[in-house]
Every structure is written in C-alpha cells, then in structure tokens.
Image (cartoon, rainbow, N blue to C red):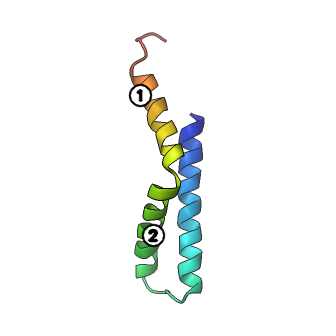
Amino acid sequence: MRPVVVYTLSRLGLFAVALAVLYLLGLRTYLLLVVAFLVSGLASYVLLSKQRDAVSEQVAKKRHRPAGN
C-alpha cells in the first residue's frame, strides 16, 4: 500500500507546485487548472518513474498471488 500512497501524494504535490507557479506567473483564468494539470502530468512522467514502477510491481505481485492469501 505504501508505494501507492507515496506516488499519489507526489502527484498531488507536483500539481500544487505547478498550480502555484502558474498563478504567480499571472495565469488567473479558468485555464489555470487545465494547464497546471498538463504540466504536472508531464513532470510526473519524467520525475516519478521510480515510484510508478514500484506501484506497478506491487499491483503485479497482488494480482499473481494465489487466492486465499
């Protein structure tokens, strides 16, 4: 469960940082959320590859675990 929590909090953190930076740069329309979402998505693709791999490994382990465990 821990890798999922770390990855999720990291994604939220990147979104908050992107939102704050764009707001400080003067983007104050409804596009602020859309652009922040896109920027944080691209940043997470590059910066969070290790966390994403840990999450996928955990999911794969749980999927291949025998029933009853």
The reply to whether dot 1 and dot 2 touch (C-beta < 8 Å) is no
Specify whether 2 is left or right of 31: right
Percent from the top left, x then y, of residue 44? 49, 58
Which of the 4 image quadrants contains residue 56?
top left
40 up-or-down from 33: above or below = above
Amino acid type, callout 1: Ala
Considering the numbered disc 1 on the image, is that residue within a helix, a strand or a loop? helix
Secondary structure under tag 2 reads helix
Number of callouts in the render?
2
Q: Residues within 10 Å of mark 2 (few under 14, many from 20)?
A: some
**Residue 41 image point, x, y percent:** 43, 62
From the viewer's perspective, is residue 63 above or below residue 29?
Answer: above
**Residue that protrudes farthest toward the bottom in the picture:** 26
Q: Residue at the location (53% across, 49% down)?
A: 8
Q: Residue at x 53, y 89 (%)?
A: 26
Indicate the position of residue 19 as horizontal and vertical percent values. Answer: 54, 74
In primary-sequence order, the first of circles 1 and 2 is: 2
Location of residue 30 in the rendering, given as x and y in whole percent from the top left corner: 42, 81
User: What residue does disc 1 label?
Assistant: 60
- At 59% from the left edge and 69% from the top edge, which residue is drawn? 17
Q: Residue at x 40, y 73 (%)?
A: 34
In the rendered image, the quadrant that contains the N terminus is top right
- Where on the picture, by quarter, is residue 37? bottom left
Taking depth in this image into account, of 46 and 8 the one nearest to the observer is 46
Residue 10 is left or right of residue 35, and the answer is right
Q: CA distance from mark 1 to mark 2?
A: 28 Å
Local crowd size for mark 1, using a 10 Å CA cut-off: few (<14), some (14–19), many (≥20): few
Q: Which residue is mark 2?
A: 39
Mark 2: amino acid: Val
Which quadrant holds residue 62?
top left
